[in-house]
Image (cartoon, rainbow, N blue to C red):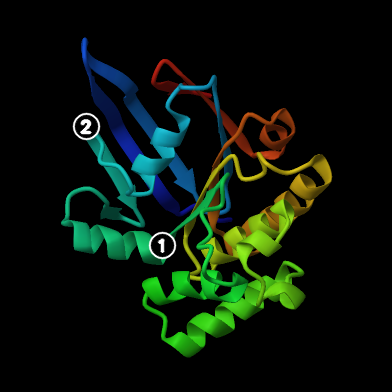
Amino acid sequence: MRDEILLEACGLCKSYPHPGGVVDVLRDVDLTVREGEVLAVVGRSGAGKSTLLHVLGGLEAPSAGTVTLLGQALWEGGETARARLRARHVGFVFQSHHLLPDFDALENVALAGLIAGLDPAEAEAQARGWLERFGMAHRITHHPVELSGGECARVALARALVPSPAVLLADEPTGNLDRQQADRVLEDVLGIMAESGKCLIMVTHDPHLARIAGRVLELDEGRISG
């Protein structure tokens, strides 16, 4: 049985300056995620769900607390070490996809492999493999503007998976898709989690998406429960 801890947060806090003082977005968040887990984080708008993903993934520094990724302290080293750890072991999927408009689908996906340290040939081979798996082989030379919302979601997912990350962080991954498109993308993601032992943490407002997660945590006034 898979039981390795992939990601752990202890006493995580995040505050932002405000004209009236500070705003506490995250308050003493403790979180442990193990191999193969699918975790949904829910809560009202503005509850700090996206901030939590950014801190867990090394994009925003916590005000206090620690994040440990594969046994390594994410926020205790310098930016170079953190960027390397993030590029190799964390995949991000955003609602707006953030695909580069001047790159075609293959280039968008392969770039993530290059950043993670793969040589160009391996990065392209991995990119082609993931795009083919997601039914996008016939669209690899198309640019984002030429792709549908569902196709962009699949390209974004392929890009996140090229480095073979241990942790996949998804912020409303199907928020811009209709139910049929969302179910297809979700089926792909869950299949990958089941076969690889990666863990998925996703922020969602979609009750259907939350129900399929193995665990649901609610973020309320900066504190997490569930």
Secondary structure under the numbered disc 1 in the rendered image: helix
**Does residue 69 sit above or below 108 in this rendering?**
above
Q: What is the x, y in percent for residue 201?
A: 53, 43
What residue type is disc 2 on? Ser
Does 162 sit left or right of 86 as displayed? right
First-in-chain label (1 vs 2): 2
- Dot 2 corresponds to which residue? 63
Does the rendering let one see residue 116?
no
In this rendering, the label closer to the viewer, 1 or 2: 2
- 55 vs 128, nearest the viewer: 128
Residue shown at 20% from the left, 57% from the top: 79
Quarter residue 80 falls in: bottom left
Secondary structure under the numbered disc 2 in the rendered image: loop
- 38 vs 163, nearest the viewer: 163
Residue 89 — which label?
Answer: 1
For the residue carrying disc 1, how many other residues have a C-alpha within 10 Å: few (<14), some (14-19), or many (20+)?
Answer: many
Q: What is the x, y in percent for residue 2?
A: 55, 56
For the residue carrying disc 2, how many other residues have a C-alpha within 10 Å: few (<14), some (14-19), or many (20+)?
Answer: some
Q: Give the residue at the far bottom of this rendering.
A: 121
What residue type is disc 1 on? His
Q: Are marks 1 and 2 in contact (CB under 8 Å)?
A: no
Q: Image quadrant for the N terminus?
A: bottom right
Q: What is the x, y in percent for residue 216?
A: 59, 31
Q: What is the x, y in percent for residue 121?
A: 49, 89
Residue shown at 71% from the left, 33% from the top: 211
**Does residue 208 sit above or below 106 in this rendering?**
above
Q: Give the residue at the far top of this rendering.
A: 20
Spatial distance from mark 1 to mark 2, Cα to Cα?
23 Å
Residue shown at 47% from the left, 44% from the top: 33
Residue shown at 38% from the left, 71% from the top: 115
**Does residue 7 sit above or below 214 in this rendering?**
below
Does the rendering let one see residue 89?
yes
